[in-house]
Image (tube, helix red, strand yellow):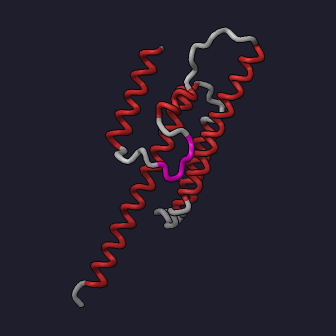
Amino acid sequence: MSSKLHAYRALILTHLRSHQPNSHLRLLHHGPDTVEELLDRHVVKKEKSLDDDENELLTRQRLTSTRREALSLYRDIIRASRFFMWPDSRGVLWRDVLRENARKEFEEARFEKDPEIITRLLIGGRDAVQAALDKLVEKQKQQIEKERNDSTGPR
């Protein structure tokens, strides 16, 4: 288990470093600072034998933490979707499409109990939100540059 966990952590860190050079920036998220902290918080570790009350308390804390992270991600998706105000090919606003898809994915994962899968879903969701916002910012920069060139160009 431990070697799988270390391999998984290395894979995630490699992915984040290769695809997100500015992944240390957290524009919408105020959760764990690193993937390591997120994994440490959610991956079940072997523990000393505890009595039932202490076990129940620890399980509740893990669930509360996971729920908090999931709710934080969902709120960030809703906040980020505000910027997508143009219609798709069917005439539906992208904002509504994004919100509907987010709701559907969260509902599908609602009863997931495996901490590794939950962590993978949270990290993937954060990556997707950040990537969408990065693309949006890049497109807006291109649009502004195009408008500047059009306004200063030959008449």
Position of residue 139 measured from the top left corner of the image (x, y, whole percent): 37, 63
In the foreground, 111 or 77: 77
Image: magenta residue range: 26-31
Principal secondary structure, stretch drawn in magenta: loop
As drawn, is 44 to the left or to the right of 24?
A: right
Q: Is residue 35 magenta?
A: no
Position of residue 111 measured from the top left corner of the image (x, y, whole percent): 65, 31
* Residue at the image position 50 percent from the left and 62 percent from the top: 84
Task: State which quadrant residue 21 falls in.
Answer: top left
As drawn, is 20 to the left or to the right of 90?
A: left
Asked if residue 54 is positioned above or below residue 13 in the image, the reply reads above
In the foreground, 88 or 95: 95
Asked if residue 96 is positioned above or below residue 39 in the image, the reply reads below
Task: State which quadrant residue 114 falls in.
Answer: top right
Residue lying farthest bottom? 155
Disc count in the image? 0
Asked if residue 81 is positioned above or below residue 12 in the image, the reply reads below
* Residue at the image position 63 percent from the left and 10 percent from the top: 48
Q: Is residue 27 magenta?
A: yes
Residue lying farthest right? 53
Quarter occupied by the C terminus: bottom left
Position of residue 86 measured from the top left corner of the image (x, y, whole percent): 49, 67
Residue lying farthest left? 154
* Residue at the image position 32 percent from the left and 40 percent from the top: 18
As drawn, is 155 to the left or to the right of 92?
A: left
In the foreground, 95 or 13: 13
Position of residue 54 measured from the top left corner of the image (x, y, whole percent): 74, 17
